[in-house]
Image: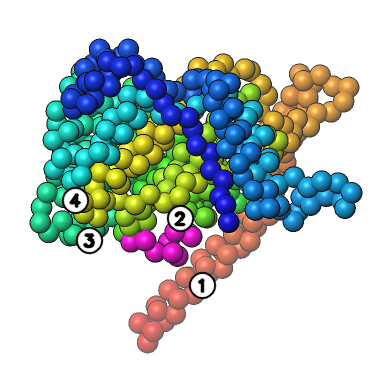
Amino acid sequence: MARFYFAWPNLTFNTELEKKIENNSTSAKTCQKSKSLTLKTKLTSNDKTELKAIFENLDPKNFWYLKSTIPEPNQKAKSVEERMIEFALSCNYYQPVDISLTSLLNELYKKKTAKEAYCFARKLEFDPEDDPLLAWLSASVQNVALLYLKKNNFNIQNYMESDKMYYLWGFLNKIFDATDDIVPFNKEKSSTPSASATNQKRKLSAVGPVENLKMGRRTDTTYIGGNGVELGCLEIGKINQQTKEFMDGSIKMPIVMKDMLLKLVEQNSSLVNELHVLGYLIMGDKISLMDMDIPKGYVTRIRRTKQVSYPDSSKNFTVRIGPLLELVAIGKEIVEDTYKKFSNNMIPLSVATDELDEFVIPPRLSGLSSLSLSLSLSLSLSLSLSLSLSLSLSLSLSLSPSTASSSASSSASSNKRQNTGSTISAS
């Protein structure tokens, strides 16, 4: 059965950069002059023509038709592939990967061992301030390659979750060192949007008790913007266990990511179809990227990449580390683009609609001014106080006779005891 993949056109870069790369070195000036492939890099008409040609070479007999979309007998059904090509031709921008990074990865694939990849990354020339992405690439390749220069490198797969996150997958979060506003919080932090969604029904009421404040769901890493906005999360498991993958990748993470996305949309509803939330799911030595957005209407969409494997030996190091670095670069672009749109867009003044249903105007007597209402309340309070004092006074008066009689009885009894004692002494 033929499968349909969207292959982005081959990227082109200047000849000077090609020569530098072939010599295992590149300069900061060259990288600055090279074209940067971002979310705003447009597709040309030739690119779409090539994409259309790929689709026309597919066999319609192998197209996929959903049962829920099969029309009436007299109408023509539209396959998933046809809908996908329509959407692809409507896109006007490239996949977000930097051209200089892509070219370096293509050169990295030519290396055969981890040692060759280490030497290639060590010889790269760049300015860490002007080219932070290249600095991240060089450091990541060298740090990971060092693990495979040992003879007993099979032990790296037995690391605990925290050790794997630090030694094996550290480059996932180190790439954000090149940004000014995004910080990966590596501890199991409770998600603020998740806590807000959990405590949404919590309110102050005189009818029933106030519910206890509940914490949000925790993730192994949370990607936070400069103003505290949460833009994505990461979950890691020690081994590739199917149950944990179901729990984290299909239940926990989609809920947390949706809470993050809805929190962003709640603060700025005009960007409802432009914001994305990032998710990384690591199971053992495999990783997949998750992207959540609201493309149109009321539907929340989540897309996943296939699992990308971590290198398991020096021989397959270069062919596996490259896709991982490219995956992380795409994730960085997703987070940066969302934060840029969110932080640079004006948030207009609006009424908090969620509080309108609970807001109740205090009761007021019609025909009376606020002053007369205040006086009447004060008068009723005074009357209540006077009544309370009068009741206390009457109660004390009613108790006085009984107290007097009790004192008299006690005195008489005492006199009687004294008389009795005198009689006994006399006898």
In this orientation, which residue lies closer to the viewer: 208 or 323?
A: 323
Numbered mark located on residue 401 in the image: none
Q: What residue lies at 47% left-to-right and 70% top-to-bottom?
A: 414
Which callout, 3 or 2, points at the residue further toward the start of the chain? 3
Q: Which residue is mark 2?
A: 248
Quadrant position of residue 161: bottom left
Which secondary structure lies at badge 4? loop
Q: What residue lies at 28% left-to-right and 22% top-to-bottom?
A: 18
For residue 345, above or below residue 96 = above
Residues at marks 4 and 1, CA–CA distance in whole angstroms = 110 Å
Closest to the camera, between mark 3 and mark 2, is 3
Which callout, 4 or 3, points at the residue further toward the start of the chain? 3
Residues at marks 3 and 2, CA–CA distance in whole angstroms = 21 Å
Residues at marks 1 and 2, CA–CA distance in whole angstroms = 86 Å
Closest to the camera, between mark 4 and mark 3, is 4
Most common secondary structure along the magenta stretch: helix
Three-letter code for the amino acid on which mark 1 is drawn: Ser
Closest to the camera, between mark 3 and mark 1, is 3
Residue 267 in view (yes/no): no
Q: Which residue is mark 3?
A: 158
In this picture, which residue range is highlighted in magenta?
Answer: 239-246
Q: Are marks 4 and 3 in contact (CB under 8 Å)?
A: no
Which callout, 4 or 1, points at the residue further toward the start of the chain? 4
Which callout, 1 or 2, points at the residue further toward the start of the chain? 2
Numbered mark located on residue 314 in the image: 4
User: How would you rate the neighbour count of disc 4 (Cα within 10 Å): few for under 14, some for 14-19, many for 20 or more?
Assistant: many
- Estimate the x, y position of residue 73 in percent, counting from the top left: 88, 53
